[in-house]
């Protein structure tokens, strides 16, 4: 009896701490339904978007706000789940070291310059501390590997640390691969997941696009080991890799969700610098028009001198007599020299795009139109007074034309290559989702909505506008935490409708956008 | 020195809101046990709060009532759409009181009261879903009041006195829903002011037409606590000219509203006493909580738009034996919060309150008083619609439920 008496004060405390209880508390298992599936061991496969990459780097808070981590936290409100492990980096500086040498840049932050204008800058407030030679021990539920293309997930040795310096392996996967010979897919399957997501394929076209299409459209080449990093993956190679991934994951008995690929040409990386940002006043426009009349004239004369019949020469020359108007004008781009375009430049068409990384200072100095030096002006003066320039002087005029380089622009044919591949990839993804009874997320249409009018939330409207729109981080390619929250909600919607579950969605207004810091150099 | 000591003790006390708004209706064991009635009940120096004019009817020359409460009060919040869930981990409140009266002549009694009618201590988990409205708040106000009670006739008395208030507030919230430093730590501000003083008064009357029936009236004035040059401390602010928040001073006003109470008590069957009070608290003075920062930090305006609210109190007392007096009661406490203004810093809705207690007369001088209160709040779906982001209202809504459990203990001394 004495023994029990000493517990009496605790009993009393138990009575006293009679806490308020809701009728249907959401923190009790059973409030939400897992429906016909099981979220207890969720594994996410993908690339930088799955990893939580943002602002040009992988950093801690970005990983915390990765869409798989957001989803895993919501899953944990539905049922008992395993801890969702992520291969966390060491800091919020972003950036990677390889044996002490920096191999990936720090994150970007929004810094206010001396002129008072905010712009994205590389954060320098702390040194990166994530060294990829510090190998992590898994398993990791978030198998998102920044930079990975579809076929990389099934490429052995993609996580071999010794392949990182020579470019045959991925530093992000090398950090957490279970062995040097494993594949991303093998490490995912080995976790015996109950639920999985696949969001892969963006890089199969994205690196082509962000490099301004300097890579090769490898459609027709079925050997991905011969691909360059900026190439477009052959749709059959994509389909084969993707179905290998899906079949292996389904083979574990897991349910899952497949996410199709958004239209990358609507991301801020391609929409921020308008192709008609050549804004001219009337006299300058007239000058430029005059300049290109001179160019056309010089070309025609040269062509006739070289023996072309005058009518053909005039016909070819006409394309260079570009007219400029007061106000915005589209830039000029360099194109391959051909019989029909012997000078190798033309004005951009309405749909063609410029990349975010283009040198804007150079644009202001004539990149994309004409670099008018005093010497060129002198030649133009000679022409205006009816004089005849020398061959060197004529060449000076032609050389003053400064078309935008291929690396800074997505031209019509490159856009076509991208959209053709994208359509084929997305058809594959949808087909595999249907064939396997998996949930399917049309991220293309949701992100299209963000780019085209925006998606409203409790604190405003989420759009793709660079820096201020809220959906995209400062690299212009990857979402912000709020953008990732929207992705998570979209995937949860698809899961709920396919598996009759009631996983709650998050309030995207509670997730941040760009990070402010003036700790930049 | 003694006064200083008393002040120290009271300053340590943190009072927890359990009544409407941040009113803490815990001013005496005997009154609380009878459903917080007391404006027309003459049985102890607790009259020093409930109706000072009644002090002159106390039989003894010297009457002292002293005591305190332990307030176990918490709130739970959830949002079914998102699965957000939060539970306060508020510290145990210990409101105290001291009342003394001294009969100078048959018609004149002097008194001193110290009590804590307003306060709040709510502690949510940092960075919870509503952290842009409040992380934690600790508000305390100590009233010190010299009293005089005058019997104008055998049937009628008046009483009252000036009130000196010293208050303190400490309030922390995140600056908005998303701002963080580079490491993702949420940017937040703490405002802290203590030793904020002001004056008020109360006046009361009691009418006793027969020995068994009393009617009482008590009015306590509004007191605005005007915090001047309090400390505002900003934490986890990004290093950016776009967020120019630095530690500064602030001014703010917090009203401690006036209240009026009328009621009656009736003695029946020798040993029974019934009491009824009607109380109205003039909360409509609390329109907005505005924090005016001294530097360029944008001022913080938080609409409250409280409404005057009523409390209906019923109490019974039974003289069981010479030694034991038993009490029980009930009161309905109406919330002053209008729809759409339900802020989680004072998350209270209408409550049904059940009380009980007893007094044990140890000897002719000393009695031990105990009381017990259980406040029952209905689960409520509520929202606060006056938080703005970029000029757009961002309602914070969800389901709340509160509970309060308050045991109390006191001593009565009479000579």
Image (cartoon, coloured by chain):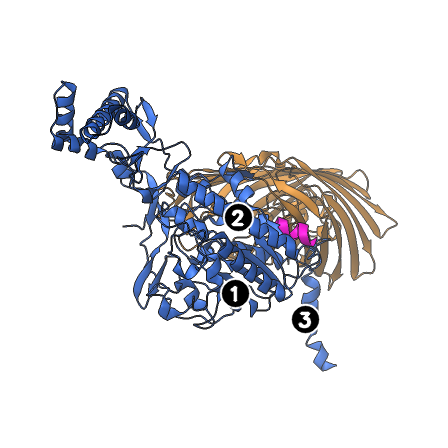
Chain colours: A blue, B orange
Q: Earlier in the sequence, mark 3 or mark 1?
A: 3
Indicate the secondary structure of the residue bearing disc 2: helix
On the image, the x and y values in percent for residue B315 come to 78, 48
The residue located at (56%, 67%) in the rendering is: A189
Q: Chain of mark 2?
A: A
How many other residues sit within 10 Å of disc 2, few (<14), some (14-19) or many (≥20)? some
The residue closer to the viewer here, A239 or A82, is A239
* Magenta-span inclusion, residue A494: yes
**Magenta span covers which residues?**
A493-505
Q: Is residue B170 visible?
A: no
On the image, the x and y values in percent for residue B110 come to 62, 46
Q: Is residue B146 visible?
A: yes
Q: Chain of mark 3?
A: A
Image quarter hosting the N terminus of chain A: bottom right
Q: Which mark is residue A185?
A: 1
Residue pushed farthest top?
A: A385
Quickly name the residue at label 2: A424
Q: Which mark is residue A236?
A: none
**Looking at the image, is A119 positioned above or below residue B14?**
above
- Gap between marks 2 and 1 measured at Cα: 22 Å
The residue located at (79%, 57%) in the rendering is: B326
Tell me the mark number nearer the camera, choosing from 3 and 1. Answer: 1
Q: Which mark is residue A9?
A: 3
Q: Earlier in the sequence, mark 2 or mark 1?
A: 1
Disc 2 and disc 3 on one polypeptide chain: yes
The residue closer to the viewer here, A503 or B272, is A503
Tell me the mark number nearer the camera, choosing from 2 and 3. Answer: 2
On the image, the x and y values in percent for residue B5 come to 51, 57
Indicate the secondary structure of the residue bearing disc 3: helix
């Amino acid at each position: 009896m004495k023994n029990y008496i000493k517990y009496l004060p605790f009993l009393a405390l138990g009575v006293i701490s009679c806490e308020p209880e809701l009728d249907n508390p959401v923190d009790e298992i059973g409030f939400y339904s897992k429906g016909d599936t099981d979220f207890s061991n969720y594994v996410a496969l993908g690339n930088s978007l799955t990893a939580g990459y943002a602002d040009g780097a992988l950093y801690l808070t970005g990983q915390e706000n990765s869409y798989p981590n957001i989803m895993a936290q919501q899953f944990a409100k539905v049922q008992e789940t395993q801890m969702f492990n992520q291969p966390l980096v060491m800091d919020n500086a972003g950036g990677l070291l390889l044996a002490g040498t920096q191999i990936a840049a720090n994150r970007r932050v929004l810094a206010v310059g001396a002129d008072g204008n905010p712009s994205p800058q590389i954060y320098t407030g702390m040194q990166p501390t994530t060294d990829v030679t510090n190998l992590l021990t898994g398993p990791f539920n978030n198998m998102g590997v920044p930079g990975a293309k579809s076929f990389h997930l099934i490429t052995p040795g993609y996580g071999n640390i010794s392949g990182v310096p020579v470019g045959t392996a991925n530093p992000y996967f090398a950090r957490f691969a279970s062995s040097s010979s494993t594949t991303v897919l093998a490490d995912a399957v080995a976790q015996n997941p109950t639920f999985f997501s696949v969001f892969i394929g963006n890089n199969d076209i994205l690196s082509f696009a962000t490099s301004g299409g300097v890579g090769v459209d490898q459609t027709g080449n079925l050997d991905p080991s011969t691909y360059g990093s900026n190439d477009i993956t052959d749709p059959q190679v994509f389909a084969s890799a993707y179905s290998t991934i899906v079949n292996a994951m389904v083979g574990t008995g897991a349910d899952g969700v497949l996410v199709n690929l958004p239209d990358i040409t609507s991301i801020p990386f391609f929409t921020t610098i308008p192709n008609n940002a050549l804004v001219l006043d009337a006299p300058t426009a007239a000058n430029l028009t005059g300049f290109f009349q001179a160019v056309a004239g010089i070309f025609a004369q040269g062509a006739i001198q070289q023996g072309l019949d005058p009518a053909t020469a005039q016909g070819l020359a006409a394309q260079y007599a570009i007219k400029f108007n007061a106000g915005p004008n589209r830039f000029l781009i360099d194109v391959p020299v051909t019989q029909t375009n012997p000078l190798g430049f033309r004005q951009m068409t309405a749909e063609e795009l410029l990349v975010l990384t283009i040198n804007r200072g150079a644009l202001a100095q004539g990149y994309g139109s004409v670099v008018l030096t005093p010497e060129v002006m002198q030649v133009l003066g000679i022409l205006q007074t009816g004089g005849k320039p020398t061959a060197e002087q004529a060449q000076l005029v032609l050389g003053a034309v400064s078309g935008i380089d291929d690396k800074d622009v997505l031209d019509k044919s490159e856009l076509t290559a991208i959209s053709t591949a994208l359509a084929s990839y997305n058809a594959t993804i949808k087909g595999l989702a249907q064939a396997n009874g998996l949930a399917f997320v049309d991220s293309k249409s949701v992100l299209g909505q963000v780019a085209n009018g925006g998606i409203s939330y409790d604190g405003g409207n989420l759009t793709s506008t660079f820096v201020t729109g809220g959906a995209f981080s400062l690299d212009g390619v990857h979402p912000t935490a709020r953008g990732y929250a929207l992705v998570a909600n979209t995937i949860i919607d698809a899961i709920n409708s396919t598996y009759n579950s009631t996983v709650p969605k998050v309030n995207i207004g509670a997730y941040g956008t760009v990070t402010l810091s003036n700790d930049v150099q | 020195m003694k006064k200083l000591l008393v002040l120290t003790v009271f300053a340590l006390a943190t009072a927890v809101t359990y009544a409407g708004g941040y009113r803490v209706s815990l001013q005496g064991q005997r009154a609380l046990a009878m459903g917080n009635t007391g404006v027309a009940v003459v049985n102890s120096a607790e009259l020093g709060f409930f109706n000072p004019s009644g002090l002159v009817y106390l039989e003894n020359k010297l009457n002292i009532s002293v005591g305190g409460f332990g307030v176990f009060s918490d709130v739970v919040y959830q949002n079914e759409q998102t699965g957000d869930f939060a539970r306060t981990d508020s510290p145990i409140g210990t409101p105290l009181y001291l009342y003394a009266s001294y009969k100078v002549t048959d018609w004149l009694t002097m008194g001193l009261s110290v009590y804590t009618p307003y306060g709040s201590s709510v502690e949510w988990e940092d960075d919870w879903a509503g952290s842009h409205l409040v992380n934690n708040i600790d508000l305390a106000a100590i009233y010190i009041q010299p009293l005089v009670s005058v019997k104008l006739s055998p049937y009628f008395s008046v009483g009252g006195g000036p009130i000196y208030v010293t208050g303190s507030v400490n309030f922390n919230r995140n600056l908005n829903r998303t701002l963080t430093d580079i490491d993702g730590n949420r940017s937040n501000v703490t405002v802290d002011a203590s030793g904020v003083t002001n004056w008020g008064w109360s006046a009361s009357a009691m009418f006793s037409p027969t020995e068994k029936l009393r009617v009482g009236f008590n009015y306590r004035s509004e007191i605005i606590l005007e915090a001047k040059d309090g400390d505002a401390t900003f934490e986890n602010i990004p290093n950016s000219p776009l967020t120019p928040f630095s530690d500064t001073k602030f001014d703010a006003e917090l009203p401690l509203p006036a209240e009026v109470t009328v009621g009656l008590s009736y003695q029946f069957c020798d040993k029974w006493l019934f009491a009824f009070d009607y109380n109205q608290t003039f909360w409509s003075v609390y329109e907005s909580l505005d924090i005016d920062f001294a530097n360029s930090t944008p001022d913080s305006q938080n609409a409250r738009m409280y409404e005057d609210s009523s409390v209906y109190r019923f109490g019974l007392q039974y003289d069981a034996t010479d030694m034991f007096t038993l009490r029980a009661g009930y009161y309905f406490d109406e919330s002053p919060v209008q729809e759409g203004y339900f802020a989680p810093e004072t998350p209270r809705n209408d409550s049904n309150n059940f009380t009980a207690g007893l007094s044990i007369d140890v000897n002719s001088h000393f009695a031990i008083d105990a009381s017990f209160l259980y406040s029952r709040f209905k689960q409520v779906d509520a929202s606060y619609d006056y938080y703005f982001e970029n000029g757009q209202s961002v309602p914070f809504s969800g389901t709340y439920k509160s509970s309060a459990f308050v045991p109390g203990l006191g001593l009565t001394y009479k000579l």
